[in-house]
Image (spheres, grey):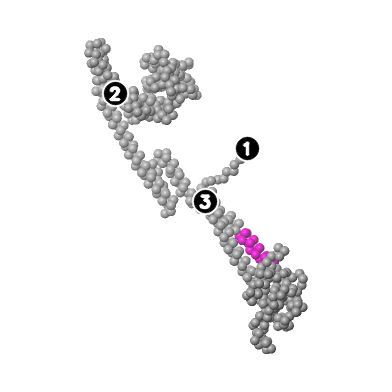
Amino acid sequence: MNTRLSFPRGLRVRLVAAFLLAAAFGALLTAGLTFQQARSAILERTQDSAVADLRTQLDSLAPDLTMPPSNNDLRDLTLQLDRAGGARAWRSSASYQGGDPVPASPDAPPVPRGLRETVRDTGEAAYERTERDGRPWLSVGMPVAYTHDPTRPTSAGKLSGLTVYASFPLDDDQADIAALVTAARTGAIPSLVLAVIPALFAARSVLRPVRRLRSGAERVAAGRFDTRLDAEGHDELADLTRSFNTMAATLQKDDAELRRMEAGARRFAADVAHELRTPLAAMVAVTEVLDEDAASGALPADTADAVRLISEETRKIARMVEDLMEVSRFDAKAAALDAEDLDLRAIVSKTLRLRGWADDERVRTDLPTPVPVHADPRRVDVVLANLIGNALRHGSPPVTVSARVEYGKAVVTVTDQGPGIPGDVLPHVFERFYKADAARTRSEGSGLGLAIAQENVLLHGGTLTAGNTSGRGAVFILTLPLAASPQEQR
């Protein structure tokens, strides 16, 4: 089983982490610089003190040394220096004219070669820190000059060739430095812990306007274009908030303009349909008379064909005008619902009979049990006629109409055996005047049939969906509320 660690990735966590990292870096940098300065001060103080002490002892003991000194003289000198070292407990050695250093005791540490070369080359006191047996040591080398001697007045201040070395452990200084490290670590950890509090406050102050922006964006996405946010301060987030308000104002203006244009277009279509309805009714009546003459053979053949063409086009225009009038009633919320309790199977049978599909082998029904509904039969008939007619025109027979009761609703399905509805067309099948094939400049219907069917279903409180079957063909599913049972009516 694969297990993956997940880490919080929210903006709050990242802000707090960044603040803590900055605080940790600052604390470590400050502690490091302080430690370095304190360490250097401690070691320089020890070195200066050791050089001063050694010089004091040599000023007291060197004048009594016989020149040139023998090894025994050098050993006596270093013995006296070790005794005078006191608490510093240094181990000294001495050499003359670059010879090997003569220690006071065999356990004296060796003099570093680098220190001997530095003293020899510079002719001045020098020191070097080394490590021995895991302990830090300081070695000091100091050349000795002649003091004023009446017997040798010209040699005063000149180097005598005698060099004295002293080495001692830096245990006390090491303890002081370790105490500094402990103090820095002890102070840094509480600082980091305390830094969490201002980090949380800083993250909260940054995230507050971000949360307001997110909430505002959600309200705008829901269509509330009058949303405005308070822009506090003069930072980048305040500028972003002002930009958001400008965007919302622009969207509100554009939305109002689109609504005004849409309302104008609907009013124009409704007015045109209303104005065309009366003359079209007269034209339809006249064409019906002409159709009868054409059918009776009273008209020449060419004239009869022209009359039939005009009659057919007039009826199409009349149907489109009626559909536009119906849509305008839905838009104006003026569509009335004359609902009653009846068996849905009766509506289906009546629709098939009125359209001549009752005995049509292309249409099959599956109506096994009564389906009581509370619906407007005229509007349900419009819906069924549209769905069955579309299935016959655009699908392939047989078209199956079934009705049943499922999950407390009346369900009608209309299924055909055609190629089905393309996936990119499905989301738009109920849109007004939508054409699946853009190359088709003129459709057989008004382009409003499915839109009117859906409006009729919504008026009942039902649903109408379109899809494809698992095998072949399209399927439309209509749901309507059931009629109340006698017990419910009481």
The Cα–Cα distance between marks 3 and 2, rounded to whole angstroms, is 67 Å
Kind of residue indicated by mark 1: Met
Badge 2 is on which residue? 317
First in sequence: mark 3 or mark 2?
3
Report helix, strand or loop for mark 1.
loop
Q: Nearer the viewer, residue 378 or 353?
A: 353
Mark 2 residue crowding within 10 angstroms, few (<14) / some (14–19) / many (20+): some
Kind of residue indicated by mark 3: Leu
User: Which residue shows up at 33% across the image and 37% down it?
Assistant: 258
Is 182 in the magenta?
A: yes
Residue 484 at x, y = what percent? Answer: 45, 22
Is 206 left, or right, of 389 in this rendering?
A: right
First in sequence: mark 1 or mark 3?
1
Q: Are marks 3 and 2 in contact (CB under 8 Å)?
A: no
Q: Nearer the viewer, residue 290 or 144?
A: 144
Q: Which residues are magenta?
A: 171-187
For discs 1 and 3, the disc positioned in front in the rendered view = 1
Badge 1 is on which residue? 1
The Cα–Cα distance between marks 1 and 3, rounded to whole angstroms, is 33 Å
User: Which residue shows up at 26% across the image and 15% down it?
Assistant: 291
Where, quadrant-wise, is the N terminus in this rendering?
top right
Residue 383 at x, y = what percent? Answer: 39, 22
Residue 457 at x, y = what percent? Answer: 40, 25
